[in-house]
Image (tube, rainbow, N blue to C red):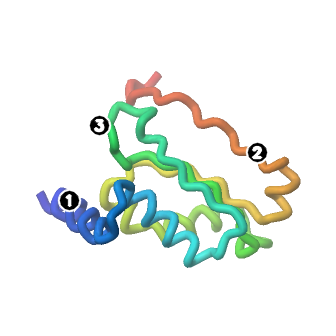
């Protein structure tokens, strides 16, 4: 019951704007504020999973920031997870992170890999 209350509280606080995508916008706002990215994509992949229509539970984040310069990948991911701690504790079930510097982004051809299909929790 406490978790449901916290999710509702988070959703209400975030929905103080007129948005229909409160979690997605919260993720975008927090990451923009913390990392001042040159490029940021917050992709809601919830529709690819067995969740109700309009859910905000599965996200992919593509964040390009020179803040990551000289930083190991695991540290980049930990920083992103730390910034999004509230969302991860209150309803976001999955978060895929692509965190690169501007140079790495350009060298990759600005390629974002396609997410694998949902396995539906069957363990296949």
- In the image, residue 113 lies at what x, y percent? 69, 40
* Viewer-side label of 1, 3: 3
**Mark 1 and mark 3: span between their CA atoms?**
18 Å
Identify the residue at image location x=42%, y=41%: 46
Q: Residues within 10 Å of mark 3 (few under 14, many from 20)?
A: few
Q: Residue furthest right?
A: 107
Dot 2 corresponds to which residue?
111
Q: Is residue 97 left or right of residue 24?
A: right
Q: Secondary structure at mark 2?
A: loop
Q: Secondary structure at mark 3?
A: loop
Whether residue 54 is situated above or below residue 34 in the rendered picture: above
**Residue, far top:** 124
Q: Position of residue 9 (x, y in %)?
A: 21, 67
Label 2, label 3: how far apart the Cα atoms are: 30 Å
Q: Which residue is mark 1?
A: 3
Figure check: 105 above or below 101? above
Judging depth in this view, the residue of 16 and 48 nearest the camera is 16
Q: Is residue 20 above or below residue 66?
A: above
Q: Which residue is mark 3?
A: 52
């Amino acid at each position: 019951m406490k978790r449901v209350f916290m999710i509702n509280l988070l959703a209400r606080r975030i929905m103080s704007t007129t948005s229909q995508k409160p979690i997605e916008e919260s993720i975008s706002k927090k990451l923009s504020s913390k990392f001042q990215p040159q490029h940021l994509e917050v992709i809601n992949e919830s529709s690819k999973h067995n969740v109700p229509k309009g859910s905000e539970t599965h996200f992919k984040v593509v964040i390009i920031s020179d803040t990551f310069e000289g930083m190991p990948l695991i540290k980049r991911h930990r920083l992103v997870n730390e910034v999004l701690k509230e969302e991860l504790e209150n309803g976001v079930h999955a978060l895929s992170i692509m965190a690169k510097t501007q140079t790495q982004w350009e060298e990759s051809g600005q390629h974002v890999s396609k997410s694998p299909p949902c396995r539906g929790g069957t363990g296949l």
